[in-house]
Amino acid sequence: MKYIRVVSIILLCFFMVRCAEKHQVSVTSLLDVLQESWEKRDASQSAVISTALIELLVITPEKTMKFLVKNGDITSELMRRMQYDVFTDYSGKDKEQLRILKENAIYALKKCACKNKEESDARDDLINVLNRIEIRSID
């Protein structure tokens, strides 16, 4: 049953992020689902949700930053675990895709128009964390 739940969350995150790219789904709705999933997550789900949050930073940095500032516990854990949950290639086949995701996230964050000092500080912290991350590959 746990396996089915993990696969369901993976598919849901993938589908919703792709729809958000095409503006067919409200980003706010997706962030609400991710927040609810975050509160009930286990270790494997954490990686999926974290990756979805980084992908949303690329697509809609302003809305995602607003969400992350509002949910500081998620932001702290995301930054603490990002190296392992998002930017480690466990299959040995995705290193280049992860490098591109990292570069796109940094670029989007640098272009992000933050509304206040809290968002600006969180953005700068995320950029610093991303700059220190090295994509690792585990075969």
Image (spheres, rainbow, N blue to C red):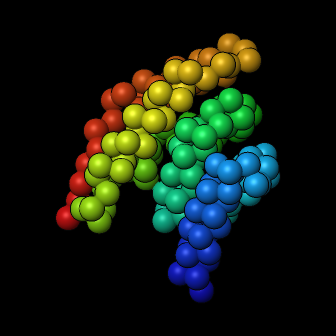
Image coordinates for residue 54, horizontal then vertical, percent: 53, 43
Q: Looking at the image, which residue is at 54% across and 64% down?
A: 45
The image shows residue 31, relative to residue 8, as above or below, that is above
Which residue is pictured at 63% across the width and 54% down the height? 17
Instruction: Choose between 33 and 42: the one closer to the eye.
Output: 33
Residue 66 coordinates in the image, percent (x, y): 72, 31
Residue farthest to the top? 117
| Quadrant housing residue 13 | bottom right
Horizontal side, residue 96 vs residue 51: left or right: left
Q: Residue furthest left?
A: 139
Of the 4 image quadrants, the one containing the N terminus is bottom right
Task: Please tell me which residue lies in front, 45 or 113.
Answer: 113
Figure disc tally: 0
Q: Residue placed at 41% from the left, 38% from the top?
A: 102
Residue at the image point whose x is 42% and y is 24% from the top:
128
Residue 88 visible somewhere in the drawing: yes
Image quadrant of residue 60?
top right
